[in-house]
Amino acid sequence: MKITFCGAAGEVTGSQHLIECGKLRVLLDCGLFQGHRAESRRKNETFFHDPSNLDAVILSHAHIDHCGSLPRLYSKGFRGPVFCTDATADVAEIMLLDSVHIQEEDARHLEKHRPQGAPRIEPLYREKDVRGVIQQFDPQDYGEWTEDYPDLRLRFRDAGHILGSAICELEIQEKGETRRLVFTGDLGRRGLPLLCDPELVGGCDILISESTYGNRVHPPAQDIKIELARIIEHAAATGGRVVIPAFSLGRTQQIVYFLNEMKNEKTLPAVPVFVDSPLSNRLTAVFRRHTKLFDEAAQKSLLNDKDPFSFAGLTYIATQEESMELNHREGPFVVIAASGMCESGRVLHHLKHSVENPNNTIAIVGFQAEHTLGRRIVEKQPYFKIFDRDYKLHAHVEIFDGLSGHADVNDFKWWYEGLASQTGVGQAFLVHGEPAASQALAGVLKDYCDEDPILPKLHDAFEV
C-alpha cells in the first residue's frame, strides 16, 4: 500500500491523502489550501495525481479545507463516488456553492494584479462543477459498513467535530490479507455542547491522525458562557460592540446555542445579537434538520425549547443593506460574522468599523492559521491592513480556546488509548498541524504505536 500526502502535511489546511493499493486508488478528503490569495491559488491549481483515475473520494466532513477542491477534481475528470455521511452531503452542498462565489471573487482580484502578458486568471471551478460533483455524493449512515469495491470496506464513526463529521475506517484487501487504516479526519472534543463526543474505534495497522492542537489543553467549554457574559456586560456598560469572527459552519451554531442557553438561564445581558452571514443562516437550517445527531443534553433541551438557534433579541441578517446598517448602529450589540479567520466576508467590514475604538471587543473563538488577519489579531499586532488600508488596534482582543471543535492533547490521548485497548497501532502519520503541534503529539502517540510516528511533508509518499 502506498500513501501520498497531497495536502495538510506540515501545515493545517488543504487535507488530501492518496491511498493506492493494487488497482485501487482512493482519496481521503479533497480540501482547499487556505491562506494568502496568491499562495493559495498556486497550491490549489494543481493535483499531484490524476483525478480521472481515482476510484472514489472518502470525505470526512464538509469544512472547505477538507471538501473545497472536490469541484476542481470533477472538472479534471473525476467521476467516482464521494462517500460521506448524510449530514456532510447536505452541508457540503451549501459550502461548495458558496465557495464558487469566493473563487470568482479571488480570480477577479488576482486578475487586476496580473502582469502584462501573463495568462488570464480564471476561477478554480465553476458552478457546473459543483453541481456535477454533488450528484456523485453517496451518503452513508454512521456505523454501517459499505462494500462497493471487492478490496475495500468503509465505515464512518462520529468524529464529534462538526455536524456529520466522521472518523473513517477502511479495511483493504492486499495480497490475501486485510489491512486496517483509520483516518481521523478532524477529531472533535469531549464534553463540547451540542454535538456528541468522538467515538472510540478499534486498533489499526495504519493511522492517519490530525494534530491541530496536539500541543494544547483547551479550557472547559462551559467557561465560555461566563466569559461571554463578561464581555457582553462590558459592551453594555461602555456602549461598545462585540465582533465575533466565526466560521459559518459549526462555530456560529455553537455560539448561538450557548447564547440561547444563557437566555434560558437568564444570564445573557440585554444586548442585541446579530448573526451576519447568509451562509450561516442556510447552514443553521441544516442543523435543524439533523437534530438526531445532537448529544443527550441537547436532546433533552429540545423537549422544552424546539429551536436552540433562536431567542428573543437574536436577529439573522439577510441583506447587504442590513449588514451595512450595523456599521453605523448606535449603542452596544454583538455581531457574529464570517469568515472565521478574518480573511474575507462581512466580518472585515465590522472589523474595519470596530478595531480603532477601545470600547469595542474582538472575540476570537477559533483556530487562526499563520499569515491570516485572524492570527495577526490574536498576536495583537499594533497595525494591520483591512482592504489595503492600515488600521491601529485599540479594541480589546479576547481569545477563547474553549470552543475549539478540535481535540486537544488530552482528547487525543484518551482516543489513542481506545485504539491501544484492542490491537494498538502499527504505523502512524500525523497531519493537519503546524510542526510544533505535530511534534508534540508525536511524543504522546509513540507510546501506542509499533513504530515512531511519521510527520510527512507535502508530497511525501510512503510504502506501508
Image (spheres, rainbow, N blue to C red):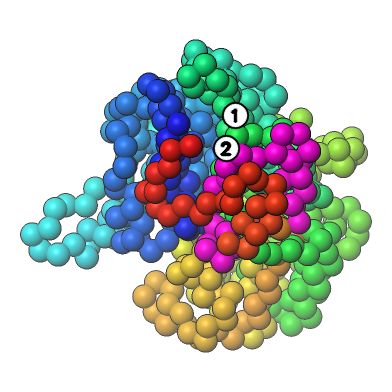
Provide residue 237's location: percent of width, then percent of height: 79, 80
Q: Secondary structure at mark 2?
A: strand
Residue at figure coordinates x 78%, y 64% from the top left: 219
The residue wearing badge 2 is: 206
Residue bounds of the magenta highlight: 410-438
- As drawn, 303 above or below 250: above
Provide residue 409's location: percent of width, then percent of height: 71, 58
Q: Quadrant of residue 220?
A: bottom right
Residue 222 shows up from this direction:
yes
Q: Residue furthest left?
A: 117
Q: Secondary structure at mark 1?
A: strand
Provide residue 187's location: percent of width, then percent of height: 66, 46
- As drawn, 334 above or below 275: below
Provide residue 435's location: percent of width, then percent of height: 52, 63
Residue at figure coordinates x 43%, y 26% from the top left: 21
Side of 26 relative to 355 (left or right): left
| Quadrant showing the N terminus | top left
Cα gap from disc 2 to disc 1, whole angstroms: 6 Å
Q: Amino acid at mark 2?
A: Ile
Magenta region includes residue 155 = no
Seen from the viewer's position, the closer of residues 123 and 55 is: 55
Side of 316 relative to 73 (left or right): right
Residue 447, numbered label: none
Q: Earlier in the sequence, mark 2 or mark 1?
A: 1
Residue at figure coordinates x 39%, y 79% from the top left: 389
Seen from the viewer's position, the closer of residues 84 and 91 is: 84
The residue wearing badge 1 is: 180
- Asked if the residue under mark 1 is in contact with the one under mark 2, i.e. CB atoms within 8 Å, the reply is yes
Q: Residue furthest front?
A: 450
Seen from the viewer's position, the closer of residues 318 and 47 is: 47
Side of 128 relative to 90 (left or right): left
